[in-house]
Image (cartoon, rainbow, N blue to C red):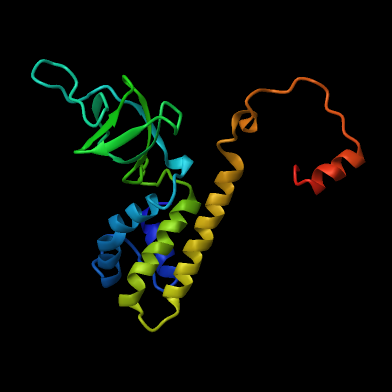
Amino acid sequence: MDTLELYNLALSLLDLSLDDLSTPSKELRLLNLNYNKVVSYCLRAWDFSFLLKRTILTEYDKDGAGNPNTWSGFRYGYVVPSDYQRAVQINADKRNPFAYRFGRLWSHANNPELEYMPCTLSLDEDGNYLAPDEFLALVAYQLALHVAPVLDPDSQAMGTAAQMYQLTLSNIIESENRSNDRPSNYEASSTWDGEVTASQEMLRDAIIRGEV
């Protein structure tokens, strides 16, 4: 999907369309004005695994003696990528502490691996979005929600766009929860390598006790 297709998906809820992205029109102007804001809004809606980026942080602020500038107990204040929006986790563990202040990501770790959400959507060399179509639909419905009050204030498009946005977001999150980040050993402290035996009576009693 490219930008023209994205815009036309949004306009389809208003029974409108664009032929290209070069001919001036009210619809195109409104979509362009709201595009960056809507993309940012959608990117903040959830930690979408298919949009996450990963990088090793190596550049950090130093004092006059060449030592790392510290803040609030954090040893390093790292320079983040230019498309950084927010950090998700450091060194593949959400328990590792960090803070974003003063344009720097503060961490205890030396040269940590950062997973982060970008602030923009990536395009390939042909101008097609790299994000899945389902997420692009999320952006399109939010765009429709933003431009509908101006383009067709008396229509039902706003309500339809809001419903489509929520439904699409729920579907994405449900799919993500089913297919990603399965806990090791289901959060048990150790694996079980012995035999498991159970009778119907044992299972019944366990259900009654609320254990399963």
Residue at the extreme left: 64
Q: Quadrant of the C terminus?
A: top right
Is 97 in front, or is 50? 97
Where is residue 87? Give x, y as percent: 35, 38
Where is residue 90? Give x, y as percent: 39, 29
Is 200 in front, or is 43? 200
Relative to 110, does residue 120 appear above or below in the rendering?
below
Left or right of 210? Residue 61 is left
Q: How many marks?
A: 0
Is 134 in front, or is 8? 134
- Image quadrant of residue 98? top left
Left or right of 212? Residue 58 is left
Residue at 36 percent across and 43 percent down: it is: 123
Where is residue 2? Give x, y as percent: 39, 52
Left or right of 19? Residue 29 is left
Residue at 37 percent across and 61 percent down: it is: 7
Where is residue 181? Give x, y as percent: 55, 36
Relative to 147, does residue 91 appear above or below in the rendering?
above
Is 61 in front, or is 29? 61
Residue at the extreme front: 209
- Image quadrant of residue 34? bottom left
Residue at 78 percent across and 46 percent down: it is: 209
